[in-house]
Image (cartoon, grey):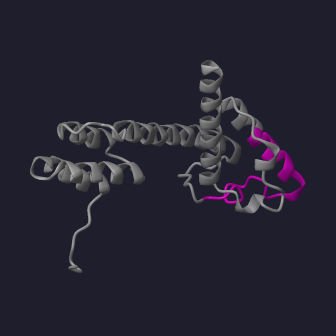
Amino acid sequence: MSTNQEFRPFHESIVEELNEASSISAVAVRALGRLIKKTAIPCGHDVIIAAWNSTGAADNCSVRASILKQKRQVERRHEVRQDLIAILTELSRRREDISDSLTLYDLGIGVVESTASGDFVNLRGRVEDKFKIRIPRERIPSASQLPEVTVGSIVKLVCELLEQKEVAGREAVAA
């Protein structure tokens, strides 16, 4: 392997391979489909679907559905993050960028021991109201864990709870 090899984003590489599908076997196309389904795809969903469709391969392994599901998850994560940033900006009065790696302490939320519990309850209430979810008691960090709670971990938790809520809603409709 050359040490000077230029690496590209997954979606660009897989689209190139799929566009060459006419020169590869159906077995190889199915193998690419399995690879796509096993890979976290952060962007380029539409171009991958278009390239997959252009192969003419049967979608027996539900490649399109897998990509669309990931696309919805990426979009949801972005929306949740934006809404959460608005809440955190208001609570912390921080005006510069808020990254996923920042902790609540970095934002000044829960830093003062006497108000830490109230700060977090306020944040929790606003998150639950905004996203119409309830955070289970066992998922709520203890006071000693608060310094380690990051913006990214809250986004992940909200996305998981929203997904669970959707699944429960679909199951209720199906029943």
**Pick the front one: 22 or 141:** 22
In the image: residue 2, left or right of residue 38: left
Total numbered circles: 0
Q: Which x, y percent locates residue 164?
A: 64, 36
Q: Which x, y percent locates residue 163?
A: 59, 37
In the image: residue 169, left or right of residue 45: right
Q: Which x, y percent locates residue 13?
A: 24, 56
Q: Which x, y percent locates residue 97?
A: 53, 52
Residue at (77% x, 36% y) in the render? 125
Q: Point out the stretch of residues depicted in magenta.
A: 102-124
In the image: residue 91, left or right of residue 50: right
Quadrant including the C terminus: top right
Residue at (22% x, 79% y) in the render? 1
Residue at (87% x, 58% y) in the render? 113
Q: Is residue 167 above or below residue 63?
A: above
**The image quarter in which residue 99 lies:** bottom right
- As drawn, the residue found furthest toward the right would be 114
Q: Is residue 87 above or below residue 95?
A: above
- As drawn, the residue found furthest toward the left would be 23
Residue at (52% x, 42% y) in the render? 77
**The image quarter in which residue 53 lies:** top left
Is residue 61 rendered magenta in the image?
no
**Pick the front one: 166 or 173:** 173
In the image: residue 141, left or right of residue 39: right
Q: Is residue 56 above or below residue 15?
A: above
